[in-house]
Image (cartoon, rainbow, N blue to C red):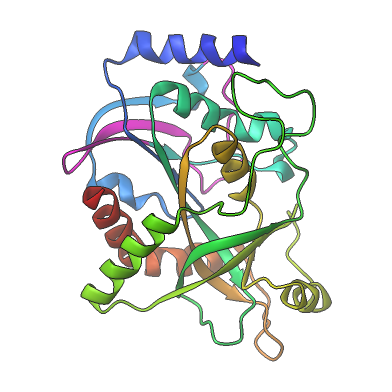
Amino acid sequence: MLKTITETVSFIKSKIAFEPEFGIILGTGLGGLVKELEVLFTLDYEEIPNFPVSTVESHHGKLIFGMLGSKRVVAMQGRFHYYEGYSMDQVTFPVRVLKFLGIKALFLSNASGGLNPSYEVGDIMIIDDHINLLPNPLIGKNIDELGPRFPDMSQPYDAELIKKALEIVASQNLKIQKGCYVAVTGPSLETPKEYFYLRIIGADTVGMSTIPEVIVARHMGLRCFAVSIITDLGVPGKIKHVTLQDVLNAANKAEPQMTKLLKQLIISI
């Protein structure tokens, strides 16, 4: 894997003259943060050696380099999922590449189903913990150059970044939730009893991404901050038939607030 990462990083560096400080992974319907960037370089995933190609219609598949205020960032406009048939190594490979490109912290977003009865569609939740029900991306031989065999996960989401985010929320009088995200394989959405089970084990939202990326990022010592937009509800009495378009509509409606939070947070670091 180390050789593959090096090959990919070398290709990207041959195409751009830019070292990012921060990485951003934009989830379903949440690519609007790119509009806030002063874009300097763009690479399609298809151009990049060893990069997977997203098969999800709402994920654009571009690696975008630019300035967010005074900060140098690289944004993944589209991510990869286990349900697409990719291995966990493939799903998380871009995070390895971003680390080797120079990032010091990773910011992630996703669309998720709300499990907490106090949540509503359109709410934004800062993730402060997670429950992983996907295969762990670190299974297999450990590569010591990337990180330790048994990385600590007592604080997967950076407490200082969460504190700063909450200060921004308070100053802007934004409505923000904070809670635990659980990742499942998908691609089918959950049954009512599955929603019930996931709530019992401690989750506030459920989705199909993010956690593998965070595990790999923490393995390499990257700070992580993540947010979920609640696009549907898995709460008894509020469960409805949901389509991808419903998810996209809810994500698009809440996206400006999420973008504002992430932009101010990154600039404040």
Q: Is residue 91 left or right of residue 194?
A: left
| Residue 22 percent location from the top left of the image | 35, 37
Q: Is residue 64 magenta?
A: yes
| Residue depicted at x 67% and y 78% | 234
Query: Residue 264, relative to residue 16: is it above or below?
Result: below
Image: magenta residue range: 49-74
| Residue depicted at x 46% and y 28% | 99
Q: Is residue 251 left or right of residue 257?
A: right
Q: From where the camera sits, is residue 259 visible?
A: yes
Q: Is residue 24 left or right of residue 196?
A: left
| Residue 47 percent location from the top left of the image | 47, 18
Q: From where the camera sits, is residue 56 visible?
A: no
Query: Residue 230, relative to residue 99: is it above or below?
Result: below
| Residue 64 percent location from the top left of the image | 35, 32
Query: Residue 215, relative to residue 42: is it above or below?
Result: below
Query: Residue 84, relative to residue 210: is it above or below?
Result: above
What is the quadrant of residue 51 in the picture? top right
Q: Is residue 72 magenta?
A: yes
Q: Nearer the viewer, residue 42 or 226?
A: 226
Q: Nearer the viewer, residue 107 or 81?
A: 107
